[in-house]
Image (cartoon, rainbow, N blue to C red):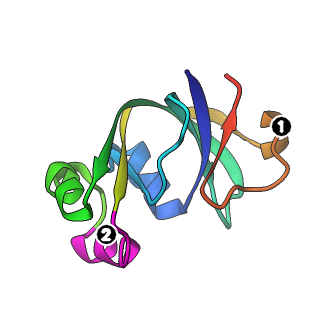
Amino acid sequence: MCRVLLSINPPHVRNILDGTKKYEYRRVRCSKEIDGMTIYCTFPVCKVVAEAEVTDIITGDPEDVWRITHDASGISKEFFDRYYEGCGEAVAYAIGEVRELPEPRDLSEYGVSRAPQSFVYIDG
């Protein structure tokens, strides 16, 4: 198993940290088996701020994924529909335990030089 580093916008990071967002949505599923995610908060924070357990990965038609995940999505149906417009498959990473880092970290501490567009695999 491995981890992915994900770039996530500040409002969504806040919702993950406060527990209202229990799924992270992506258009592409990781090809490797993952058990955790490292959360990079995008501009204006531009730091790694948390780590989270990935407990499940749900894939399928966007409407089916929404039906399964909407109660803990942390986003509106309108936002979800805009994000998946024209996509035939949705991916939802179920977020388990979340640990906010005591001090935000630079990407370089993870061997990453720039924020990924979607995700990047990292060690540990």
Which quadrant is the C terminus positioned in?
A: top right
The residue under label 1 is: 111
Task: Locate residue 2 relative to residue 113 in the image: left or right.
Answer: left
Residue at 32 percent of width and 48 percent of height:
59
On the question of residue 97 being in view, the answer is: no
Which quadrant is the N terminus positioned in?
A: top right
Viewer-proximal residue among 106 and 38: 38
As helix, strand or loop, the secondary structure at mark 1 comes to loop
Quarter of the image holding residue 45? bottom right
Residue 50 location, x and y as percent?
57, 38
First reached walking from the N terminus: tag 1 or tag 2: 2
Q: Is residue 103 magenta?
A: no
Residue 77 location, x and y as percent?
23, 71
Position of residue 101 relative to residue 6, above or below, is: above
Residue at 34 percent of width and 60 percent of height:
89
Residue at 35 percent of width and 49 percent of height:
92
Residue 91 location, x and y as percent?
37, 52
Residue at 26 percent of width and 63 percent of height:
62
Task: Locate residue 42 relative to residue 99 in the image: left or right.
Answer: right
Residue 82 location, x and y as percent?
35, 78
* Disc number for residue 80: 2
Mark 2: few/some/many CA within 10 Å (<14, 14-19, 20+): some
Quarter of the image holding residue 106? top right
Q: Is residue 77 magenta?
A: yes
Mark 1: few/some/many CA within 10 Å (<14, 14-19, 20+): few
Residue segment shown in magenta: 76-88
Position of residue 62 relative to residue 85, above or below, is: above
